[in-house]
Image (cartoon, grey):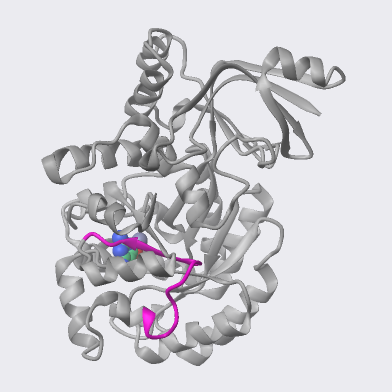
Amino acid sequence: MIIYRAQVLDTPESPFTGGALRSSDDAGLAVQDGTIVDRGDFRTIADRHPEAEVVDVRDGVLLPGFVDTHVHYPQVRAIGGLGMPLLDWLDQCALPEECKLEDPEYARTIAGEFLAGLTAAGTTTALVFGSHFADAVDALFAEADRVGVRVTAGLVTSDHNLPEPLLSTPERTYDEGRKLAERWHGHRRLRYAVTPRFSYSTTPAMLASGAALMQDVPGLWFTSHINENPAEIAAVIEQFPGSPNYLDTYHRHGLIHERSVLAHNAHPTDPELALLASAGAAVAHCPTSNSALASGSFPLRRHLDHGVQVALGSDVGAGSGFSLFKEGLQAYFMQQLLMSDGVPLTAAHLLYLATRAGATALGLDDVGDLSTGNQFDAILVRPNSGQPLDVCLRHAASAENALAKIFSLATPADVARVWIGGDEVAA
Ligand code: GUN
Ligand code: ZN
């Protein structure tokens, strides 16, 4: 057993429903076989477990590992394509890069870069948009398994409106998806997600093939994009004349349920929000992506009013990096700019959105906060001595103020240590 002695901040209860930041200046977290088996004031925990080794990490601030609910594996090298709306950005930046993953050797290199990007940013759990190529998705799972990150991912499926190398057929994607799901779903920390790219690039037959796979392999997840950009939405509505709205294009195939996570939803209708809430589906809010592509301002207030679960996604590579500190801060900025229509977010809200909310959206009850019984998925924020964040933390007025300083200033360079299930990830 190890007792981590630390300043700990986490959000086991949602600040959106009255929960507060939980702050312990000198906590003891007793960890056995990757699980937090006891937690309390350090002295109490040390007395209760006199045989345990003590690891003192009071030189930083311990937070739960981040949960990124929307991030694209093949787009690591596409980050930074500024100045275009969604459909142009896909054509000019994302899709040419994604075509390169047809080469399995290239895909293995990208998988290494992708997992390194996640862990360096302190992301310990992610719902990952995979690749259109089965071998590349296999490489992603293999690398995630090697590094130990909790990854839910799948083969991306499309059968029109994309460059030819990215297209497949409903039959082939079913077969390839089934093989991948049988190999990886439930293997250690990995799970499989049925992943049509978006309705714009799929026919009803392709969506039906994803639904068939979900029927045939129990417990799979579903993820896709929705209501991101006005031109995209108009094209989808034209393509699916039988559907009253974008969500219905998925829902009519039985794809919207408690294991569904949809990215963006910047322009939802009220019936769509009502259906997402009643189905128990979650939305991945991707603030830097929505800003970079000028997709729109996320209507967080309307999501909350309807009772829709919301978590954070980096949306690399439309998003501007892997850090959920940055996504949290950008979410805050965007709500501020919405003035009276925005939700005033505190630092506790940002931590909640980046951790507990994501874990809940992904059905992972034992990660997302550092409570007894949970996995020890944690990050140590420890800025270099003399850096503005270091100075600010030493002069923080309160725990909430320290957390606000962290969200304002922290980058992956400040994430000094990362643990997943008690295993420290190699830097
Ligand atoms: N919609 C379909 N594909 C993508 C993608 O790769 N990124 C974003 N932001 N939206 C999409
Ligand atoms: Zn995306």
Percent coordinates x, y for residue 151 in the rendering: 57, 56
Percent coordinates x, y for residue 37 in the rendering: 74, 34
Q: Quadrant of residue 93?
A: bottom left
In the image, 326 versus 404, the foreground residue is: 404
Is there any visible trace of residue 108 in the rendered image?
A: no
Q: Quadrant of the N terminus?
A: top right
In this picture, residue 89 sits left or right of residue 201: left
For this orientation, the residue located farthest to the front is: 18
Q: Quadrant of the C terminus?
A: top right
Q: Main secondary structure of the magenta part?
A: loop
Residue 216 inside the magenta-drawn segment? no
Examine the rendered structure and indicate whether residue 12 appears above or below residue 195: above
- Magenta highlight range: 251-266
In this picture, residue 40 sits left or right of residue 25: right
Examine the rendered structure and indicate whether residue 399 appears above or below residue 258: above
In the image, 52 versus 289, the foreground residue is: 52
Percent coordinates x, y for residue 319 in the rendering: 31, 50
Residue 255 inside the magenta-drawn segment? yes
In this picture, residue 181 sits left or right of residue 329: right
Q: Quadrant of residue 255?
A: bottom left
Q: Quadrant of residue 375?
A: top right
Examine the rendered structure and indicate whether residue 275 appears above or below residue 47: below
Is there any visible trace of residue 77 in the rendered image?
A: yes
| Residue occupying the point 23% across, 78% down | 245
| Residue occupying the point 35% across, 14% down | 388
Percent coordinates x, y for residue 135 in the rendering: 58, 72
**Ligand 1, image quadrant it occupies:** bottom left
| Residue occupying the point 51% across, 52% down | 360
In the image, 74 versus 214, the foreground residue is: 214
